[in-house]
Image (cartoon, rainbow, N blue to C red):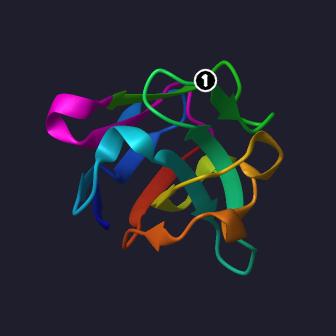
Amino acid sequence: VQLQASGGGLVQAGGSLRLSCVASGRTFGNYAMGWFRQAPGEERTFVAASRRSGGSTHYADSVQGRFTISRDNTKNTVYLQMNSLKPEDTAVYYCTAGSGIILSSVRNSQAYAYWGQGTQVTVSS
């Protein structure tokens, strides 16, 4: 699976961005898709995931109610709609994919086999 993320940028606090990640190389709908982020000097952390097409979605507590993950199987694309952005959301956002990910592992970066190149999101105060 190859993943290409886009949509990052600079936005003021309270604003919105939508990240996109196009997947190729496998049957998209069977894969769990997720977003992680990494701020400078920090570890990569879970943001959101969709276990498979039509399956459950999961969010980090810090983004619950502000971010929404969705997928369009016709375009092999997963989205992350980010609203009410805060300066602490500033990070490089990575798209990821994996198969056979059980519920207890959906927030674990090591459960995912494929990673995109990352897209920078900067939120100014």
> Which residue range is magenta in the image?
72-86
| Quarter occupied by the C terminus | top right
| Label 1: which secondary element | loop
Residue 43 lies in the magenta stretch: no
What residue sits right under mark 1 in the picture?
A: 66
Determine whether 52 is above or below 119 in the image: above
**Residue 103 visible in the current orientation:** yes
Residue 20 appearing in the image: no
Q: Is residue 125 above or below residue 40?
A: above
Q: Is residue 74 left or right of residue 117?
A: left
Q: Residues within 10 Å of mark 1 (few under 14, many from 20)?
A: some
Query: Which residue corresponds to the image point at 33% horizontal and 53% vertical from the top-left?
Result: 9
Q: Residue furthest left?
A: 75
Residue 100 locus on image (x, y percent):
60, 52
- Was residue 74 drawn as part of the magenta stretch in this picture? yes
Q: Report the amino acid beneath label 1.
A: Arg
Q: In front: 120, or 19?
A: 19
Residue pictured at 61% horizontal, 23% vertical: 66
Residue shown at the point (38%, 68%) measured from the top left: 116
Give left or right: position of 42 versus 98. right
